[in-house]
């Protein structure tokens, strides 16, 4: 069972992915005395369900239960059982707010020492939040790419971060996003970040789908991993690379020739 978003902010009402179809009204006995009752089949591939969770008294809340009982949700192409090391390594140095169903993999290339070195040469960094949902990884099934619809994902840019980004743009400095999730968060809020005054705290949901051609309004650089075909993260990367000399093709041919690793725990690149 993979836990997705709470429904309407209620942590007892949840959307989950299951590996089998289960009838409405079925109660699943979870480890350590907890129960999950299926209320509604939502659909999709893999199959999603909505239901309500009954926690045992020994757990303070959902986060406590998942921390003590669950496993890191490694992507299915990592064909092994998660181990204790994954609890640390499948987590970025920036992470501080629970909510995403997967790690934003570009962030895995950074650590505290590297951030300190960047700051020592004058590179500022700020953090933004996008609670990654299953839609980020869902394959594009539409015949025409522009017909693909992104699932809504929650984002937050603090007042401190938004002012720093706004000021950098006003001063003509580069804004380099670490990851496609950060990119979508920034581009979703482009109008506010390019406004006449600092925009303050920014929260909401993003359904922004970026594919070629796209006019990037905030970014002048992108750090990202290598992505699988027919995914929205690949169309975003392709859009940022642009059409000049089919740059995305050259990059991926190089990666294939040199046996680069794909996706989570994989290699990365920076495009300026």
Image (spheres, rainbow, N blue to C red):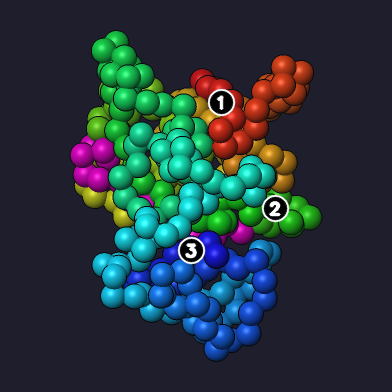
Identify the residue position indicated by label 1 in the image: 268
- Furthest residue in direction front, as rendered: 32
In terms of secondary structure, where does tag 2 sit? loop
Q: In this image, 94 relative to 106: left or right? A: left
Identify the residue position indicated by label 3 in the image: 3
Spatial separation of the CA atoms under disc 1 and disc 2: 22 Å
Q: Of tags 3 and 2, which is closer to the observer? A: 3
- Residue range corresponding to the magenta coloring: 149-163
Q: Quadrant of residue 211?
A: top right
Q: In this image, 188 relative to 81: left or right? A: left
Which numbered disc flags the more N-terminal residue, 1 or 2? 2
Q: Position of residue 68 (x, y in %)?
A: 37, 57
Magenta stretch contains residue 157: yes
Which numbered disc flags the more N-terminal residue, 1 or 3? 3
52 vs 269, nearest the viewer:
52
- Whether residues under marks 3 and 2 lie with C-beta atoms below 8 angstroms apart, the answer is no
Q: Residue at x 31, y 14 (%)?
A: 117
Q: Is residue 51 visible?
A: no
Badge 3: residue crowd in 10 Å (few <14, some 14–19, many ≥20): some
Residue 140, label in figure = 2
Q: Residue at x 68, y 57 (%)?
A: 147
Looking at the image, residue 160 lies above or below residue 109:
below
Q: Position of residue 180 (x, y in %)?
A: 51, 39
Magenta stretch contains residue 177: no
Spatial separation of the CA atoms under disc 3 and disc 2: 22 Å
197 vs 119, nearest the viewer:
119
Q: Residue at x 64, y 36 (%)?
A: 227
């Amino acid at each position: 069972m993979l836990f997705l978003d709470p429904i309407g902010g209620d942590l007892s009402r949840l959307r989950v992915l299951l590996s089998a179809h289960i009838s409405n009204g079925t109660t699943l006995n979870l480890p350590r005395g907890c129960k999950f009752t299926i209320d509604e089949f939502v659909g999709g591939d893999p199959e999603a369900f909505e239901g309500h969770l009954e926690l045992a008294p020994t757990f303070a809340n959902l986060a406590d239960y998942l921390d003590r009982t669950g496993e890191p949700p490694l992507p299915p192409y990592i064909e092994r059982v998660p181990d204790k090391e994954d609890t640390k390594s499948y987590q970025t140095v920036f992470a501080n707010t629970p909510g995403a169903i997967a790690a934003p993999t570009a962030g895995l290339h950074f650590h505290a020492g590297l951030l300190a070195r960047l700051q020592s040469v004058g590179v500022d960094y700020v953090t933004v939040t996008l609670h990654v949902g299953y839609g980020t990884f869902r394959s594009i099934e539409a015949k025409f790419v522009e017909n693909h619809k992104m699932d809504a994902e929650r984002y937050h840019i603090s007042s401190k971060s938004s002012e720093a980004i706004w000021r950098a743009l006003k001063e003509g400095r580069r804004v380099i996003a670490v990851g496609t999730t950060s990119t979508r968060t920034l581009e979703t809020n482009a109008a506010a970040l390019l406004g006449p005054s600092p925009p303050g705290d920014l929260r909401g949901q993003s359904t922004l789908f970026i594919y070629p051609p796209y006019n990037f309004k905030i970014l002048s650089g992108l750090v990202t991993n290598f992505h699988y075909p027919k995914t929205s993260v690949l169309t975003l990367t392709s859009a940022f690379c642009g059409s000049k000399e089919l740059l995305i093709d050259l990059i991926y041919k190089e990666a294939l020739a040199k046996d680069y690793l794909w996706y989570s725990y994989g290699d990365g690149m920076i495009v300026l």
